[in-house]
Image (cartoon, rainbow, N blue to C red):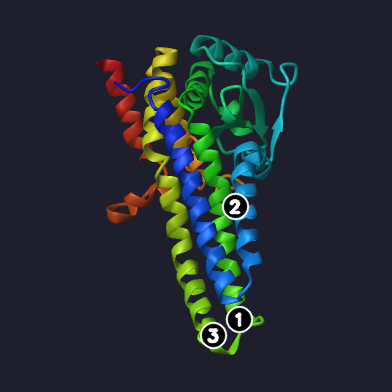
Amino acid sequence: MASLYTQQDSNIAKTWILMIIFLIVLLGIGYFFSYYYQSPSILYFAFIFSLIMNIGSYWFSDKIVLGISRAKQVTKAEAPDLYNVVENLSITAGLPMPKIYIINDPAPNAFATGRNKDHAAVAVTSGLLQMMNKTELEGVIAHELSHIGNRDILLSTVVVVLVGLITLLSDFFLRLSFFGGNRSRDREGGGAILALIGVVLAILTPIIATLLQLAISRRRESLADTSGALLTRYPEGLASALEKIAAYKVPMKHANNATAHLYISNPFGPDSRRLSGISRLFMTHPPIEERIAALRQSEQS
């Protein structure tokens, strides 16, 4: 049975694989441009840039995520009830106390981020705090602490940076295809190649970004539900919390595609969840109704 920390080794391996693939892709792009413009310095730049991005995504991606989400760190004096819930469940789970952040947003939601359990953060919206009772809040926090225990947080946070960079690369290729450069005459067809790459990337960017998110998101949410229920020993708390989250009809004020997979529920609201057929394959979260049913079934078994 899936339990807290089940996927630690798998998530560490996925993080390294993702970073290595990212390095190889950037070096490939750098090689293409160095050949096209007959400038080896471009390849050197691509190598240095890819290293900086990989290092930066490891050390600073959580700060980027919290900044994008407009989360504000709070102390025990500012949010005593929330602090006590996080502290008690952290002790139960055997985890260091994470930093606590609040997002000023009426939509109920939450996420965890950080590079490891010693440098982790839990962020909840003001709407979640207002809407949940104690057992429901405990269910949500236990879910997020499970992400920390399973080391989901580094992988899912690094993805935010890489998805953003993929979007920038797409825009870069499109712009470069319209503005020449110092090309040699024997590469007159290069402009068409650049234009083709730009168009292909522009089309594939949303798909690539979604596939990156899907690679780490859907199963980890179900596992965190299970692990969170084991942590509180009360699956109904999280099930009830998810029901309230699903019933809220308005998306978050600053919902972002790059960070959507981090949240306990899709931040774009209920309309984005009402999908069927092949569209369900591209959902970053399992259907919330299925998650609720699984939690209540586990309570009965």
Identity of the residue furthest to the right in this view:
77
Say which mark, if any, is on residue 50: 2
Horizontal side of 283 relative to 155 (left or right) equals left
Residue at (49% x, 54% y) in the render: 24
Residue sitting at x 48%, y 39%? 16
Q: Which residue is mark 1?
A: 178
- Residue 232 location in percent, x, y? 44, 14
How many residues crowd mark 2 within 10 Å: few (<14), some (14–19), many (20+)?
A: many
* x and y, in percent, of residue 115 in the image: 58, 32
Q: Is residue 272 left or right of residue 75?
A: left
**Residue 276 placement (x, y as % from top left):** 30, 52
Closest to the observer, 66 or 162? 162
Query: Which sits in the foreground, 76 or 183?
Result: 183
Q: Given the image, on which type of amino acid does mark 3 rest? A: Arg
Tell which tag, 3 or 2, sits nearer the viewer. 3
300 or 281: nearer the eye? Answer: 281
How packed is label 1: few (under 14 Cα within 10 Å), some, or many (20 or more)? few
Where does the N terminus fall, quadrant-wise? top left
Report, in whole angstroms, how far the alpha carbon at label 3 lies from the one at label 1.
16 Å
- Looking at the image, is 196 positioned above or below residue 122? below
Q: CA distance from mark 3 to mark 2?
A: 27 Å
Number of the label disc, if any, that sits on residue 187? 3
